[in-house]
Amino acid sequence: MSGTGSIPAGHGGADGGGHPHARGSVWRTYVFSTDHKMIGIQYGLTSLVFMLLGFFLMLAMRWQLAYPGQPLPLIGKFFSPQNPFLPGGAMSPDLYNSFGAMHGTIMIFLGVVPLAFGAFGNYVVPLQIGAPDMAFPRINMASYHAYLWGGVLMLASFLVPGGAAKSGWTSYAPLASVADTRALAPSTVFHPVFNGQTMWLIAMVLLITSSLLGAVNFITTIIQLRAKGMSWMRLPFFVWAQLVTAFLLLLAFPPLEAAGIMQLMDRLAGTSFFVLSGLYVGGKLLEASGGGSPILWQHLFWFLGHPEVYVLILPGMGIVCEVIAVNSRKPIWGYRPLVLAAIAIGFLSFMVWAHHMYLTGMGSKVSTFFQTTTVLISVPSVIILTALLISLWGGAIRFTTPMLFAAAFIPMFGLGGLTGLPLAFNAIDLALHDTYYVIGHFHYVVAPGTIFALFAGIYHWYPKITGRRMSEFLGRVHFWPSLVCMNGIFLPMFLQGMAGVHRRWYDGGGTIANPTYELVRGAIHWNEFMSISAFLLAAAQVPFIVNLFVSLWRGERVGDNPWEATTLEWAAPTPPPHGNFAMPVEAHRGPYEYSVPGHERDFLPQWEAVKGSGT
Amino acid sequence: MEIPYTVHERPDTGLWNAKVGVWLFLASEVMLFGGLFSAYIFLRIGADYWPHHALNVPLGLTNTIVLITSSITMVLAWVSVKMRDFGQFRFWMSATLGCGCLFVVIKSIEYRDKFSHYGVVFRDEAAFRKYEPELSALGANIKTNTEGHGARLDRTPHFEIAGHLASGVTADAIELAPDRHEGGAKGGAHGGALRVALADVARWGVFAPRYSTYYAIYFTLTGLHALHVLGGMVVLFYFLVTGAKMFAADPEHLANRVEVGGLFWHFVDLVWIFLFPVLYLL
């Protein structure tokens, strides 16, 4: 076996001390598995498929933005001019709205969160803390299945009359309260339950249930199942990041579930939680008691919505931290501030939500409060980013593919964060609200930020999951074009946004020759450049998909600790059997003991009892 | 490798896994009901009119007592397992389930009453004044925000009566036997009937969720709470039926399970202790 030869004996595979993989039926092993690693893989593959789908939706929208009203390439010719969704192959406004709402929903709730939390958290956290499994394996299985069926329901909503939800991923009331009903679209026959917006709500309730089950499981596991010696300050930062994320999911999601239930009541029982008095829809007074408040929806939505931003970013930061430590061969600079900053982010993220609502006229006192907390939360974020950056200083950096992605995360997330500062201020936000500036800002955080971190994680832990390394060559072919194209898409958004291009314009502000709004004439020409960047970004993902599958057979075989890393997951056999470790593991030191002076090797794993020349 | 600390405490945390899990779950439940309670506050602050004493307080109080009793029997059931007395456990657990059933039955009676009672909101003050002499002759209980309890002069005036349908609804009018003053919330005795032209009516109907934001939040909160009661009963019933086997094999494990189920049951009880004053009394 390659690797380091320093791993406890008996690590040679399934004949070790742990239970062999429970080889019942195929169903028990692959579908209804209770093993955290299989559930992690299930989460990973499902969420990658959803992410690809969400990306395709956006490609269709980018075509419409760059070439308004022209038939989609490749598939456009299959649609007749009478088609309600794609008349003559060109997107209808309703379909554009639908794709916009579903792109956001799919990417956040079905793509990034399940990949960052469900997949990486499930696979890596129990291994890193030296646990045999999650604390509640069957609840873990239920969590994945709630997620899967929520996702299936979300996809099925594309097929019902009227199509999928169209009110944006935020489902703002009162639009969402009357969307996909006869009041708004008298010519369509909607099913009372199986219509886009109602199915969106039901699917969200399932997804919220899934993350609730996951969050309870993660926190219990981290509190209860840490191996001997794995004290709180010896936890890898990734585990801390996942712990804070789990608390955010646990406490921030239920108010959205409450809001979802209330919107369901509005749609199914005719209540007026979010329907104000005297609302006219389609030229007619809506038959409802009224007295509700659309602002209430916004409050409840953003009470989840803002912590959700940190649900998206914290696991990414955790992954980047692990990858940077391994590849710079240095202890992470400022481990304790990192942990405290993550906890501070967790607390503060519950107090910033209304900065999404400056335009609602909450009053200057409320706005000032949320402006202050919003600026405050940038402090721990900067601490984390700075610690990661300084960790590179003086390191013997190995430019592996995961390291490239992790290194790119720092400036890309930095750009996303810095462009968020102006939005924190009430006065500036009033001008920039709902423009492409906002889109550019949060996409820099999530796309070349979190998604790059997730790619880093996939390349980093792939050898532990499969026993083979992904191709470095294909990894580079994936990385560099992705980096360039991401910036090609999102950098011009800042220019467009400051020129006043609104995020929901179906025709992207018109064509250069014939702009819808004179104001934005100077910024429209970027649409084509951004769209072409998006299409090239799609092409740049091909090497990744090929790499992901071909490496299963062709990748270089590696041992248990191919990166010469220090954290406990690399002590387990590869791939880890059911029950994870061949023999009881113990943490003897902190997680990042790299290049400790006086040792012959430049890493000192957590699981090794004290030995070597230095001590 | 078995998952550790499923039954016995981890020494440094002093907890077994399910106890951590259930407390976390309850934290998220607090946020769920907290979201709905804050919606209640939000809606009530912004409402033109908020009904007072629209619910049957004696029935609500009875249900409060029933649930508190069930929390006591729940603790006794847990103590019985701890004392290793399975017969006692069965008795107290059955009593808990009985209280749960009683609660659901009383709640159903309250719900049915709402769905057979009609409310009429007048279009404006002028429309109401037309019927005022007739209504006072009938001794009808008029709900308004212009005078008396809950008067809010800064809001749009609101005039509302409630009662049972006398002969029914025609194309242009509704005939109602209004609830009287003395009848209290439930109405009780009904006298003569009154014919109200639909042209004078802003909205009318049974007190279903759609009737007003008060009934919307009332049904949503109590409905979600009732679902929690039913869910808790399913779990407790499962412990009652399958408990014997686990009691024989590992009584401490059963005690843990009952403790966890009990924590949930107490939480559901606690939610009701907030719901009762907020919806019935305030």
Image: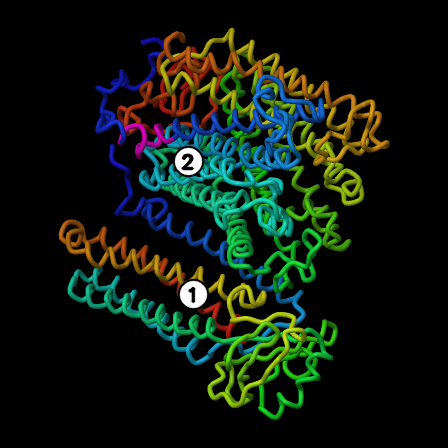
Q: Secondary structure at mark 1?
A: helix
Q: CA distance from mark 2 to mark 1?
A: 33 Å
Q: Are marks 2 and 1 on the same chain?
A: no
Quadrant for the C terminus of chain A in the image: top left
Q: Position of residue B31 (x, y in %)?
A: 50, 54
Label 1 CA crowd tier, 10 Å (few <14, some 14–19, many 20+): some
Q: Is residue A30 magenta?
A: yes
User: What's the residue type where badge 2 is placed?
Assistant: Leu
Q: Position of residue B39 (x, y in %)?
A: 58, 60
Q: Chain of mark 1?
A: B
Quadrant for the N terminus of chain A in the image: top left
Q: Residue A148 bears which disc, if any?
A: 2
Is the residue A506 above or below the residue B53 in the image? above
- Which image quadrant is residue A70 in? top right
Q: Residue at x 73, y 29 (%)?
A: A508
Q: Position of residue A514 (x, y in %)?
A: 82, 26
Camera-side residue of A443 and B218: B218
**Which residue is the extreme one toward the bottom?**
B137
